[in-house]
Image (spheres, helix red, strand yellow):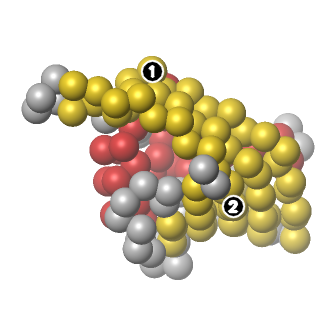
Amino acid sequence: MSDNEEIIRVIESLFEAGISKDTGILREIHLNDPKFSSFSDLPPFDLKDFQTTIELEELRFVSISDYSYQIKNPKISIFDDMAIVAMELIQKGMLVDNRTYTGEHMEIHGRASFVLVKTPEWKIAHFHLSRTD
């Protein structure tokens, strides 16, 4: 598998966790290191560390039913053992409130950027999701 294919596979694994609800993969694809950071397209919008990111992603994905995503126009730039990926991203699903048994359809059009490091496999060291809608 080429580096480009492996990098896209890692990023797709992040969003596939929203479909499968198998959030265990999240700890495998993110760099568990104090240097890790993330920004999300859903509140809270502050800079997050590894543990907070994992907890919020798990909560996000288990709270969205019928989740789907589409990656558009990915650009991958590799610099030795570091890669930068920029893309457009569309996410859809139903936000479920289990307390009131209600749901709200969501569709997020956005942009995403990822920084990955090879250690020896590619891991996400930083990502930033932002809405464009």
Q: Which of marks 2 and 1 is nearer the N terminus?
A: 1
Residue 52, how many percent across, how many down? Answer: 34, 63
Q: What element carries label 1?
A: strand
Is residue 74 visible to the viewer in this orientation of the structure? yes
The residue labelled by disc 1 is 66
28 displayed left or right of 6: left
The residue sitting at the front extreme is: 133
The residue labelled by disc 2 is 113
130 displayed left or right of 84: left
Residue 77, how many percent across, how many down? Answer: 88, 62
Quarter of the figure with residue 128: bottom right
The residue sitting at the left extreme is: 99
Amino acid type of the residue that numbered disc 1 sits on in the rendered structure: Asp
Q: Residue at x 76, y 51 (%)?
A: 87
Residue 76, how many percent across, how many down? Answer: 85, 56
Q: Up-down: is 28 above or below 90?
A: below
Q: Which residue is drawn at 39% across and 37% down?
A: 61
Q: Up-down: is 10 above or below 48?
A: above
**Separation of marks 2 and 1 at Cα, in angstroms:** 24 Å
